[in-house]
Image (spheres, grey):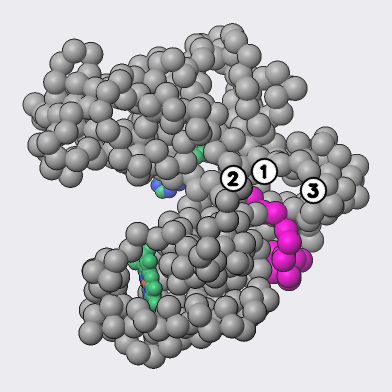
Amino acid sequence: MARVKHESRWYPLESEESVLDGLLRQGVAVPNACRAGACQSCLMRALSGEIPEAARVGLKDTLRTQGYFLACVCKPIVGTELEVAGADALRVPARLESLTLLSESVLRVCLSTAAPFDYRAGQYVSLLREDGLARSYSLASLPREGLLELHVRLVPGGAMSGWLASEARIGDTLAVQGPAGNCFYVSGRPEQPLLLAGTGTGLAPLYGIARDALESGHTGPIWLFHGARTPEGLYLMDALRELAARHSGFHYRPGVLTGGSRDVAEGALDVLIRAECPKPVGFRAWLCGDSGMVLSLRKKLFLSGLSLKDLHADAFLPSAPRVEPVGAR
Amino acid sequence: MSTVAHEKSVYEQIGGEPAMAAAVDVFYRKVLSDDRISHFFEDVDMERQAAKQKAFLTMVTGGPSNYSGKDMRAGHAPLVTRGLNETHFDAVVEHLRATLEELNVPAPLVARVLAIAGGARADVLNR
Ligand SMILES: Cc1cc2nc3c(=O)[nH]c(=O)nc-3n(C[C@H](O)[C@H](O)[C@H](O)COP(=O)(O)OP(=O)(O)OC[C@H]3O[C@@H](n4cnc5c(N)ncnc54)[C@H](O)[C@@H]3O)c2cc1C
Ligand code: HEM
Ligand code: FES
């Protein structure tokens, strides 16, 4: 058995139980969402004890050296002890500045932070409600724009998206934690062709990355593929068309599975990409949105010649069902 | 600086760690595109799989590696249960040869790498 100490109390872990599951089961509140190591909502800090490497995959060096780890994928070795604390120090209060519908199912959420928040367009943050509900969202804004801009898909019965759509009020205080992730523009090779592809609100980081690249003086072609099931799932079409009109190297290609038209291609995203970029050797690519799409597209692009180091992907993993504390039934 | 009188490994001669990243791209792509063996490598987590390919290439080129014959047996035992045999082994060795040739590794070095890989046959196939 391993033991975890939190705020001066000891909690035993069952075998193969993660620090997150063990603490939640015994009634300790820890923010979490994906419970699969992808969203970084469950960051905690080790004050003493050994952290398995698997619980630090994807963390920035600055976080690693301070002892941070992901509680949902942290399974301490049997017989060891770990003393942990929350990640409150990484959170910045954020005020809700605006809520605008970009389409029937996508809400634009703008936030301001009290202290400057250092990030790159396309990275993601954990958004925390006052009661600790946490969900990750990618940043569509550029730092110079001041406000943080998120695109939130309205999920039926969704805890965070539902609250934002119906109960949240301008002026409410939330917190953001982060930023995290490697989905952002890297300058240094202005002529390199760029391929951005996403489904649904996977457009959020891509919208940020494309604008960041253009503002950084990128000269190579930039392809943006946005896929949805039906035309209703597409959004920001006018803004992107306008961007394409202003920059000859920027190509915007919306696509749907059914209901295509003169302006919107019909077909699977990978087929549309292959038609326009048949040989993406030497490209840099960013893939964001639905995790099945992201993983399969990553493999296809790799096989068609893209180098692994030039492939960046953020899979928008949904939240996992909650574990109830013992005695809650 | 003092010079140690030892024969440089192929790993050092082809450029060490940085050269491995390029080799992994080429090798992993060949393996994933080969229907005879790709099913052994279909890990959804490509980062994790790429790290293993790197461990493989580092080992067969004589780079720093901590894998013993026993580790090789244990690591590949589940694959043998799933039908890993001589044919698959030869396919991997063939992709290894093609990868090194594509990266312009001189023939005598390629031969040394293939000899190291061949030496792992019994352990990999759990004979
Ligand atoms: C790195 C990262 C970045 C993300 N960026 C964004 C972003 O920019 N914009 C955005 O809208 N979302 C993004 N997400 C997803 C987001 O964090 C939430 O999962 C999503 O908003 C749903 O939260 P909710 O509280 O509204 O719904 P929940 O209460 O979490 O979900 C309600 C129910 O629906 C299920 N569900 C939710 N989404 C899906 C899905 N896609 N597929 C299948 N079942 C589902 C849940 O499992 C649950 O049963 C990102 C996720 C990650 C990991
Ligand atoms: C040529 C001799 C071979 C050597 C020296 C070798 C070496 C290695 C090494 C060092 C690892 C461990 C990586 C790690 O876990 O960190 C590994 C894993 C693996 N090898 Fe090999 N290998 C050989 C042949 C093969 C063959 C023929 C196949 C299948 C066709 C194969 C399939 C795999 C797979 C699928 C894994 C990952 C297993 C897992 O997910 O844990 N290997 N190999
Ligand atoms: S990373 Fe742990 S809950 Fe998402």
Name the kind of residue labelled 3 in the image. Arg
Q: Residue at x 62, y 62 (%)?
A: B15
Q: Do the dots labelled 1 and 2 sit on one chain?
A: yes
Q: Nearer the viewer, mark 1 or mark 3?
A: 3
Residue B62: x and y in percent read 46, 68
Residue farthest along the bottom direction in this orientation:
B87
Q: CA distance from mark 1 to mark 2?
A: 7 Å
Residue beneath label 2, please?
A: A202
Q: Residue at x 67, y 19 (%)?
A: A147
Comes first in the chain, label 2 or label 3: 3
Q: Secondary structure at mark 1?
A: helix
Q: Residue at x 38, y 26 (%)?
A: A67
Q: Residue A225 lies in what quarter of the image?
A: bottom right
Labelled disc at residue A206: 1
Residue beneath label 3, please?
A: A189
Residue A284 magenta-drawn?
yes
Q: CA distance from mark 1 to mark 3?
A: 18 Å
Residue A104 visible in rendering: no
Kindly check if marks 1 and 2 are in contact, taking CB atoms under 8 A apart as contact: yes
Q: Is residue A76 left or right of residue B18?
A: left
Q: Is residue A240 above or below residue A299?
A: above
Name the kind of residue labelled 2 in the image. Gly
Q: Is residue B59 above or below residue A76?
A: below
Viewer-side residue, A293 vs B114: B114
Q: Secondary structure at mark 3?
A: loop
Comes first in the chain, label 1 or label 3: 3
Q: Quadrant of the N terminus of chain A?
A: top left
Q: Is mark 2 within 8 Å of ligand 1?
A: yes
Residue A36: x and y in percent read 35, 44
Boundaries of the magenta span: A272-288
